[in-house]
Image: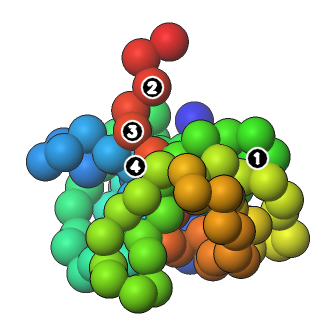
């Protein structure tokens, strides 16, 4: 894809566990993109390993809990810019910034 620009936010594929995590595009050279995950790791990647930095209503993802730092299954119930309202399996809801979300590689 040719639409990535330096400074763009994206969800980027992390080979270690096959999840997509929030990241920032730092540099683009030829067909490669250099990114920094929000966790601090940096790497060169293929543009096909990036996904738009958005959440969609009804989407099932995982959210990092502000209370214990663990990821839990959630469903996105509303979206407001870079925030998503998520519903946990116990039916509690909260607003979370997109940088707390991750999703598993979907093999469609």
Q: Give the class, few, some or many, for how many residues have Cα within 10 Å of label 4's Cα (few <14, many ≥20).
A: many
Q: CA distance from mark 4 to mark 2?
A: 10 Å
- Sequence order check, earlier mark of 4 and 3: 4
- Sequence order check, earlier mark of 1 and 3: 1
Give the structural element (helix, strand or loop) at label 3.
strand
Q: CA distance from mark 1 to mark 4?
A: 15 Å
Residue assigned mark 4: 20
- Image coords of residue 21 (percent x, y): 40, 59
Closest to the camera, between mark 4 and mark 3, is: 3
In the rendered structure, are the residues bearing label 2 and label 1 in contact, judged by CB atoms less than 8 Å apart? no
Q: Give the class, few, some or many, for how many residues have Cα within 10 Å of label 1's Cα (few <14, many ≥20).
A: few
> Can residue 26 be seen in this snapshot?
no
- Image coords of residue 5 (percent x, y): 60, 62
- Sequence order check, earlier mark of 2 and 1: 1
Quick check: 12 left or right of 80?
left
In the rendered structure, are the residues bearing label 2 and label 3 in contact, judged by CB atoms less than 8 Å apart? yes
Residue assigned mark 3: 104
Give the residue drawn at x 42%, y 17%. Answer: 107
Give the structural element (helix, strand or loop) at label 2.
loop
Residue assigned mark 2: 106
Residue assigned mark 1: 56
């Amino acid at each position: 894809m040719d639409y990535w620009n330096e400074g763009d936010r994206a969800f980027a594929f992390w080979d270690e566990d096959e999840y997509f995590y929030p990241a920032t595009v730092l540099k683009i050279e030829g067909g490669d993109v250099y990114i920094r995950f929000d966790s601090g790791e940096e790497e060169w990647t293929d543009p096909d390993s990036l996904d738009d930095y958005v959440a969609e209503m009804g989407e099932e993802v995982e959210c990092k809990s502000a209370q214990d730092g663990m990821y839990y299954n959630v469903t996105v119930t509303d979206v407001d810019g870079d925030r998503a309202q998520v519903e946990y399996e116990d039916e509690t809801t909260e607003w979370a910034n997109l940088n707390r979300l991750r999703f598993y590689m979907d093999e469609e």
